[in-house]
Image: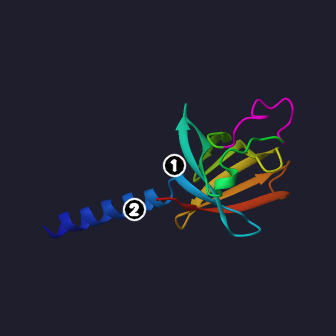
Amino acid sequence: MKNLLILITLAISCISANAQNNIFGKWKTVDDVTGEVKSVVEIYKESGKAYGKIIDITDPEEKDSVCDKCDEDDPRKGKKIMGMIIITGLEQDGKKWDDGKILDPENGKVYSCKIWVEDGKLYVRGYIGISLVGRSQTWLPAQ
């Protein structure tokens, strides 16, 4: 009986650790300058890659905003930001997901992207060229 309890405890511990390192789900985006929650992004898996879609915008006045700063050749140009896929094509590389792209709808720029989870928070890194030149945000779980 004692061995069974130990095995159950270990299994629960592994499941809990795995859940804490899971990128998939809903995340509150937090502005890296102001610290305010801006939106909720749902990270999901499709064809083995990770994608992220804006499913809520916290500022009621921004809910109908469009990506007017996107490049002319970006199909998201002029489209509503609510419902927009802003993270595309991330591939799993150990505990991180890398080699994808992220759109910043506020400035219309597309960056290389990698994301990972630590301590229940999602770390999002957008960068140009090598990952040393870029910007990072920490997103929080959304219930």
Between 28 and 79, the one nearer to me in the picture: 79
Closer to viewer: mark 1 or mark 2: 1
Q: Amino acid at mark 2?
A: Ser
Circle 2: element type = helix
Total tally of numbered discs in the picture: 2
The image's mark for residue 24 is 1
Q: Image point 77% across, 45% down: which residue?
A: 112
**Percent x, y of residue 39:** 63, 55
Res 87 quadrant in image = top right
Looking at the image, residue 45 sits to the left or right of residue 86; the answer is left
* Residue matched to label 2: 16
Q: Image point 72% across, 56% down: which residue?
A: 125
**Percent x, y of residue 134:** 82, 57
Q: Residues within 10 Å of mark 2 (few under 14, many from 20)?
A: few
| Magenta-highlighted residues | 69-81
Tell whether position 72 is magenta.
yes
**Percent x, y of residue 47:** 55, 31
Q: Residues within 10 Å of mark 1 (few under 14, many from 20)?
A: some
Circle 1: element type = loop
The image's mark for residue 106 is none
Compared with residue 98, is residue 35 higher up or lower down, i.e. above or below? Answer: below
Compared with residue 55, is residue 58 higher up or lower down, i.e. above or below? Answer: below
Tell whether position 16 is magenta.
no
Distance (Cα) linking label 1 and label 2:
14 Å
Q: Amino acid at mark 1?
A: Phe
Classify the position of the N terminus by image quarter.
bottom left
Q: Image point 78% across, 35% down: which residue?
A: 78
